[in-house]
Amino acid sequence: MTNEFLRQLCSSLPGCTEDLKWGNDLCFCVKEKMFCVTSVEGGFHVSFKCDDEDFTMLIEKHDIIPAPYLARNKWVLVEKGASLSKKEWDHFIRKSYHLVVSRLSKKAQKELGI
């Protein structure tokens, strides 16, 4: 897993935008709502939103922990890209995106073509 793979995956999702926050974090957003965050310096770290079941399962894996400041909202922090396969990355990032989109207004969803 690389940041470039992550960028390609996220940017393929309807309405995805990128925003640099807190000086060092590249945030992937839909309608200004974050669904994935990665560090641009200092090693590979990625956070994303999960449902309850995935959150419980993922934090039992090595190198995946509840995301600092966002764990109460079911976000995880993946500390090593190899912790998940490319297929799993694709699944969880898309699921994170859809979890965020599902909380948008019907009008915003329609604008995204969803």
Image: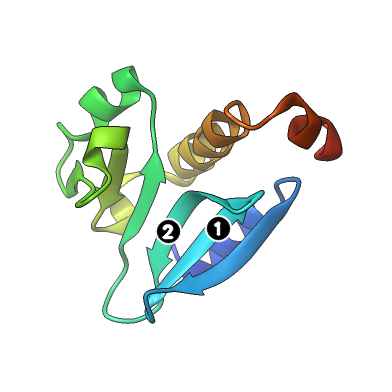
Residue drawn 23% across the image and 40% down it: 71
Depth check: 71 or 6 in front? Answer: 71
Where's residue 72, x and y in %? 23, 35
Which quarter of the figure has residue 40?
bottom left
Read off the residue under disc 2: 37
Q: Is residue 63 above or below residue 52?
A: below
Label placed on residue 28: 1
Drawn side of residue 29 relative to residue 12, left or right: left
Where's residue 29, x and y in %? 58, 54
Drawn side of residue 69 relative to residue 104, left or right: left
For label 1, the crowd category at 10 Å Cα-Cα, with few meaning under 14, some 14 to 19 and many 20 or more, is many
Residue drawn 68% across the image and 54% down it: 16
Residue drawn 80% across the image and 31% down it: 107
Q: For the residues marked 2 and 1, what is the alpha-carbon distance in whole angstroms?
A: 6 Å
For numbered disc 2, what is the local secondary structure?
strand
For numbered disc 1, what is the local secondary structure?
strand
